[in-house]
Image (spheres, rainbow, N blue to C red):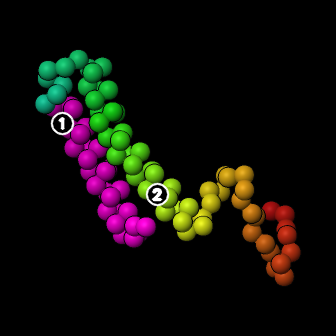
Amino acid sequence: MLKPSVTFVLWIAIALFIVVNDVVGDTWIAATLTVRTVEWYKVLVPLPYVILMSIIHARRTAEDGRTHVGSLDHDPPRHAAGQGGHY
């Protein structure tokens, strides 16, 4: 399991990579390719990194026992004295 600080640094690195990729796509690559090709480049190049971080994040949260709020197996919080309550 990665530490939260490592995960945060990886997220920042991906965000920086996307910004740099966007600048490169708009400057150097745009001069030689069509607009549609440049847009595909700007979407497809960072996609594997975003997917990888999503997998890492999903594994981290699964190991911690946290569930997504919208998931079907989510237990609502219990209120005072162990009573189940309505929201």
Q: Quadrant of the N terminus?
A: bottom left
How many numbered circles are shown? 2
Q: Position of residue 42 (x, y in %)?
A: 29, 33
Q: Image quadrant for the C terminus? A: bottom right
Q: Kindly report the secondary structure that dominates the magenta region of the rendered protein.
A: helix
Q: Residue at x 40, y 67 (%)?
A: 2
**Which mark, residue 24?**
1
Q: Dot 1 surroundings within 10 Å: few (below 14), some, or many (20 or more)?
A: some
Mark 2 lies on a secondary structure that is helix
Residue at the image point whose x is 67% and y is 52% from the top: 70
Give the secondary structure at mark 1: helix
Q: In the displayed orientation, state which residue is furthest to the top.
A: 34
The residue drawn where x is 62% and y is 56% is 68
| 34 w.r.t. 39: above or below | above
Q: Residues within 10 Å of mark 2 (few under 14, many from 20)?
A: some
**The disc labelled 2 sits on which kind of residue?**
His
* Left or right of residue 80, residue 11 in this image: left
- Distance between the Cα atoms at labels 1 and 2? 28 Å
Q: Is residue 68 or residue 52 the one in the foreground? A: 52
> Closer to the N terminus: mark 1 or mark 2?
1
Q: Does residue 24 appear left or right of residue 59 in this picture? A: left
Bounds of the magenta span? 1-27
5 over 55 or under it: above or below? below
* Disc 1 versus disc 2: nearer the observer: 2
| Residue 69 on image: x %, y % | 65, 57
Q: Which residue is mark 2?
A: 57
Query: Left of 41 or right of it: where is 32?
Result: left
